[in-house]
Amino acid sequence: MVTFNVDLFLTKIRNRQILQTLPGAINLVSNAGATIAKGIDLSIKARPVAALRLTGDDARSAGAASLLRRLISQAVKPATI
């Protein structure tokens, strides 16, 4: 017996907020703008004989937040004197 399972997903979020932890244990809620996440989950299960069960799973996802990318790039810029 062999079972396949495939799940595709697409998530769109507007006005997302994220929690940032700054040095000195300061927490700050920031806007991340729009976020899009998409991906696929794969699963296969096989039982060739009663005493043997084989399974395999894989998941792939990709996401991007428009404002979050700008915040990160600003945070990692070296300080200028």
Image (spheres, rainbow, N blue to C red):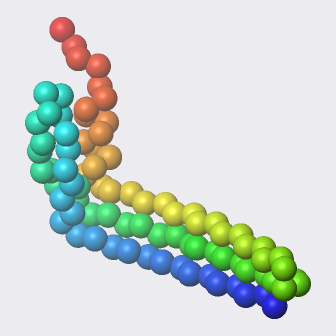
| Count of marks, rendered view | 0
In screen coordinates, is 70 left or right of 29? right
* Snapshot quadrant of residue 24: top left
User: Who is closer to the viewer here, 67 or 57?
Assistant: 57
Q: In this view, does 29 lie above or below 76?
A: below
**Residue 56 percent across, percent down from the top left:** 71, 70
Q: Residue furthest front?
A: 51
Q: Which residue lies furthest to the bottom in this view?
A: 1
Q: Measuring 64% from the left and 84% from the top, which residue is drawn there?
A: 5
Q: Measuring 78% from the left and 74% from the top, which residue is drawn there?
A: 54
User: Who is closer to the viewer here, 45 or 80?
Assistant: 45
**Residue 20 percent across, percent down from the top left:** 20, 44
- Locate the C terminus and report the quarter of the image it occupies: top left
User: Who is closer to the viewer here, 78 or 9?
Assistant: 9
Q: Is residue 73 above or below residue 31?
A: above
In screen coordinates, is 3 left or right of 8? right
**Residue 67 percent across, percent down from the top left:** 25, 52
User: Who is closer to the viewer here, 12 or 45?
Assistant: 45
Q: Residue furthest top?
A: 81
- Locate the N terminus and report the quarter of the image it occupies: bottom right
**Residue 27 percent across, percent down from the top left:** 12, 42
Q: Which residue lies furthest to the right in this view?
A: 49
* Snapshot quadrant of residue 60: bottom right
In screen coordinates, is 2 left or right of 27? right
Q: Measuring 31% from the left and 29% from the top, which residue is drawn there?
A: 76
Q: Measuring 30% from the left and 55% from the top, which residue is drawn there?
A: 66
